[in-house]
Image (cartoon, rainbow, N blue to C red):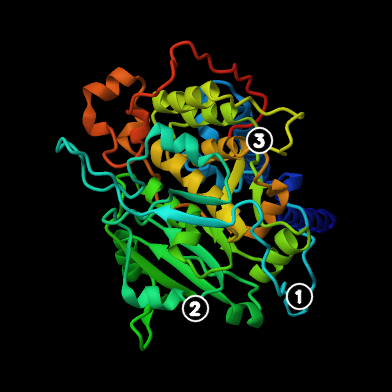
């Protein structure tokens, strides 16, 4: 009996141990080994997954850092291929910008007035003391040998006429575009509309290169004071109608938001970039009743009230012409080198323009010059339409008409040729960056002439040469340019 009791106790103890082993497999038992192995595998997989995520994150951060450092290095590189990656119009730059890997432009506060309603508009215009009367050549020369081409928008200016145009006199008559029969025709309804425009905020889109951007922070006072005019060619007008809402008023005027569209027919040049320089530089010719104008490029979205810009950059300092300093370059020969590396126009033609400027005494910029820089950031121009400013604009445009459409290359030269008669205010580039939101172009712009490497290549392929612009580059120059040596360019700054 005692044995039976012992057997019963032992049996219950065995069953209890078996139950505990089945319930807690980590402590061993019938299924403990198998379950313990599965549990260990789960722990290993969990730890491995966490390590994989951390390793992937570190590799991704290192990749981003590598790309960013490479981008910064490429902007400083003297090698054309790598420097091209810094080009704001390139696909690489656009991709990096989309990924947030491009550093934002340096901005600084603009010391504008607090309230547009408090701005006092001068009662009197700046008097014309240096140039008192300015008139324009309106008819092109007709050759008697029958070889004369159709009238050019900028005229067939001779080298002698060009030289004389830089000699300031009280009464002057110069080439200034808009030669009769040369193109850029405005509809009568738009001619009548712009006659009432005393204050103009103007922009332009050519070859459907940009999309309209509405300015922001515009006061009610500026809305009533300014004419907001967007100059477009026929290609851009159709593009805008296809992609943006265009309304028509009772007089047939076409509007995109606050902008009044000003279509121009019969574009004067083969090169859209050159066509875009007409409203940009010759604003006073396109809108002759305007007393003040602000030009902004089509890629810009203005974020500062235009009346505050006039007060800050013109009236406060008693200036009549204001333009921003270029971000990278002060020396025009360095800017020309940058244009060649980035294929902004045919390299031999840029060199030829620079040789002419060098032959005519244009020195590289240094701190001893009486200008802050010879190279502007031309995306914004703020001016009072005085006779002297209008003359400067005409002479500046004549250089664009005769040579390359790269207006930064000729701005400082015209300033130099006027021998201190033309004064302007060049404001810091960081303020320029604070005036706008910069939008990318709809596409990259390119023309075949930009890829030409030699003059002989251009002569073998005349289809690369513009037929209506840059003809001064193909007209025999009266000086000997063979002995001209361009100043050496030490690339000390980022690519522009």
Closer to the chain start, of discs 3 and 2, is 3
Say above or below: 421 vs 116. Answer: above
Task: Between residue 113 and residue 238, name the one nearer to us.
Answer: 113
Image x and y of residue 217, in percent: 65, 73
Residue 254 figure quarter:
bottom left
The reply to whether residue 210 is visible in this rendering is yes
Q: Is residue 495 left or right of residue 183?
A: right
Residue displayed at 50% across by 70% down: 289
Residue at label 3?
A: 65
Q: Secondary structure at mark 2?
A: loop
Measure the C-alpha gap from mark 1 to mark 2. Answer: 21 Å
Residue displayed at 47% across by 31% down: 342
Measure the C-alpha gap from mark 3 to mark 2. Answer: 55 Å
Task: Between residue 118 and residue 196, name the one nearer to us.
Answer: 196
Say above or below: 188 vs 59. Answer: below
Q: Which mark is residue 339?
A: none
Closer to the chain start, of discs 1 and 2, is 1
Q: Residues within 10 Å of mark 2 (few under 14, many from 20)?
A: some
Closer to the chain start, of discs 3 and 1, is 3
The reply to whether residue 81 is visible in this rendering is no
Residue displayed at 22% across by 29% down: 462
Residue 332 figure quarter:
top right
Measure the C-alpha gap from mark 3 to mark 1. Answer: 50 Å
Task: Between residue 374 and residue 5, name the one nearer to us.
Answer: 374
Furthest residue to the bottom?
250
Residue 490 figure quarter:
top right
Q: Which mark is residue 120?
A: 1
Q: Quadrant of the C terminus?
A: top right
Residue at label 2?
A: 196
């Amino acid at each position: 009996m005692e044995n039976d009791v012992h057997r019963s106790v032992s049996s219950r103890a065995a069953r209890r141990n078996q139950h505990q082993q089945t319930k807690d497999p980590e402590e061993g038992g019938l299924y403990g080994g198998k379950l313990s192995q599965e549990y260990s595998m789960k722990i290993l997989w969990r730890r491995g997954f966490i390590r994989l995520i951390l390793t992937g994150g570190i590799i991704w951060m290192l990749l981003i850092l590598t790309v960013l450092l490479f981008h910064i290095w490429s902007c400083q590189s003297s090698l054309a291929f790598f420097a091209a990656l810094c080009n704001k119009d390139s696909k690489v730059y656009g991709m990096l910008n989309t990924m947030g890997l491009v550093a934002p432009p340096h901005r600084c506060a603009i010391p504008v007035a607090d309230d547009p309603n408090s701005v006092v508009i001068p009662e009197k215009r700046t008097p014309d003391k240096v140039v008192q009367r300015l008139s324009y050549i309106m008819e092109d020369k007709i050759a008697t040998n029958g070889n004369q081409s159709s009238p050019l928008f900028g005229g067939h200016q001779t080298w002698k006429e060009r030289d004389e145009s830089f000699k300031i006199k009280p009464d002057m008559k110069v080439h200034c575009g808009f030669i009769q029969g040369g193109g850029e025709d405005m509809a009568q309804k738009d001619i009548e509309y712009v006659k009432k425009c005393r204050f103009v905020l103007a922009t332009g889109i050519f070859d459907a290169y940009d999309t309209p951007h509405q300015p922001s922070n515009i006061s009610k006072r500026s809305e009533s004071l300014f004419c907001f005019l967007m100059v477009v060619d026929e290609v851009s007008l159709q593009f805008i109608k296809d992609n943006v809402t265009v309304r028509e008023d009772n007089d047939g005027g076409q509007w995109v938001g606050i902008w009044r569209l000003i279509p121009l027919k019969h574009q004067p040049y083969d090169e859209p970039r050159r066509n875009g320089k007409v409203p940009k530089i010759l604003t006073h010719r396109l809108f002759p009743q305007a007393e003040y104008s602000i030009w902004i490029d089509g890629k810009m979205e203005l974020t500062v009230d235009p009346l505050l810009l006039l007060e800050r950059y013109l009236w406060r300092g008693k200036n009549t012409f204001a333009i921003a300093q270029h971000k990278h370059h002060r020396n025009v020969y360095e800017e020309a080198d940058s244009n060649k590396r980035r294929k902004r126009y045919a390299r031999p033609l840029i060199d030829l323009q620079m040789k002419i400027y060098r032959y005519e005494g244009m020195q590289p910029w240094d701190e001893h010059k009486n200008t802050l820089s010879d190279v502007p950031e031309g995306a914004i121009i703020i001016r009072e339409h005085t006779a002297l400013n209008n003359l400067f604009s005409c002479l500046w445009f004549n250089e664009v008409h005769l040579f390359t459409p790269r207006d930064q290359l000729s701005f400082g030269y015209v300033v130099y040729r006027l021998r201190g008669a033309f004064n302007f205010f060049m404001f810091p580039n960081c303020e320029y960056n604070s005036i706008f939101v910069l939008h990318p172009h709809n596409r990259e712009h390119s023309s075949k002439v930009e890829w030409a490497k030699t003059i002989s290549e251009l002569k073998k392929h005349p289809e690369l040469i513009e037929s209506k612009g840059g003809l001064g580059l193909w007209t025999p120059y009266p000086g000997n340019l063979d002995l001209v040596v361009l100043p050496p360019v030490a690339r000390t700054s980022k690519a522009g």
